[in-house]
Amino acid sequence: MHILIITETFDVLKDFISQLELEENLGQNYARFKYQNQSIDILISGYGGSMSAYEYAKAIGKYKYDLVLQFGQCYALKDQVEKNQLVCIIDDYFGDIGIGEESNFASVFDLQLRNKNEVPFKNEILENDTLIPEVFSDFRKVSGITCNAIPTNLNSIANAYIKNYPDVISREGANLLYICQKENVKLIQLFYVLENIENAQFKITPDEQMMKVVTEKIEQVLNESVMLT
């Protein structure tokens, strides 16, 4: 099975990568490692929607991956979503591609500049149809919204929020989901909840707790990933 692991910053995977044997450098912040009896590719995409999307597309276009596994970062939009946990995003959409702001915001779909059901969208939403194997059953399944700028209150994304009432917000989720769906590549997105949206400005990078949680889960996830074939 050919697997690509993506994260925004090296710190999230540094403990895991330190245990691996480097096989080949594939590009900037992109390399192939030996994990047990198979090879896995790891891409450190960096931050920034357009810049990261370029790195995603370049890597996915270069090799035919059986599975892309993303460890991302997000913020909770609902009180029921607790911080300091990994959640599994099962659908996502773009929240700030359009004109206006707050309750006056209109997306490119609202403006009829794009069809709301243009493949792979379903009424503006990107639904991840990758089969979720049993190993992911412990992760809370959530809906996401992706915005280039993370606001500090829901009023800032009022019209965008009511389209699907998402549980979490991130800067990267829909970007990778869109690319993988266009390229017909299976994707699992595990995002760590850094904070709630009101406190987003106080937690902008991963902490030791996130690194610990990812390190604990990644081997379990990789060992069971063969269930996706």
Image: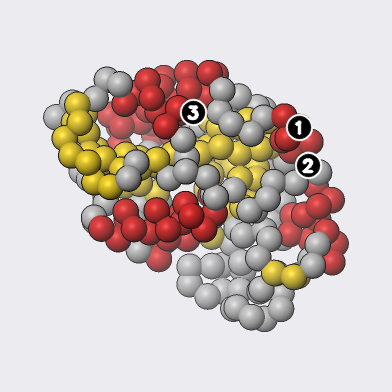
Q: In this view, does 4 lie to the left or right of 142?
A: left
Mark 3 or mark 1: which comes first in sequence? Answer: 3
Mark 3–mark 1 Cα distance, whole angstroms, equals 26 Å
Residue behind mark 2: 152
The residue type indicated by label 3 comes to Asp
Nearer to us in this view, 197 or 11: 11
What residue is drawn where x is 67% and y is 81%? Answer: 112
Q: Which residue is drawn at 26% across and 40% down?
A: 31
Residue placed farthest to the bottom in the image? Answer: 112
Identity of the residue drawn at 31% across and 32% down: 222
- The amino acid type, in three-letter code, at marker 2 is Thr
Q: Which mark, residue 138?
A: 3
Residue under the image location 84 percent in, 66 percent down: 104
Mark 1 burial class by Cα count in 10 Å: few <14, some 14-19, many 20+: some
Q: How many numbered discs sit on the rendered protein?
A: 3
Give the residue at mark 1.
Answer: 199
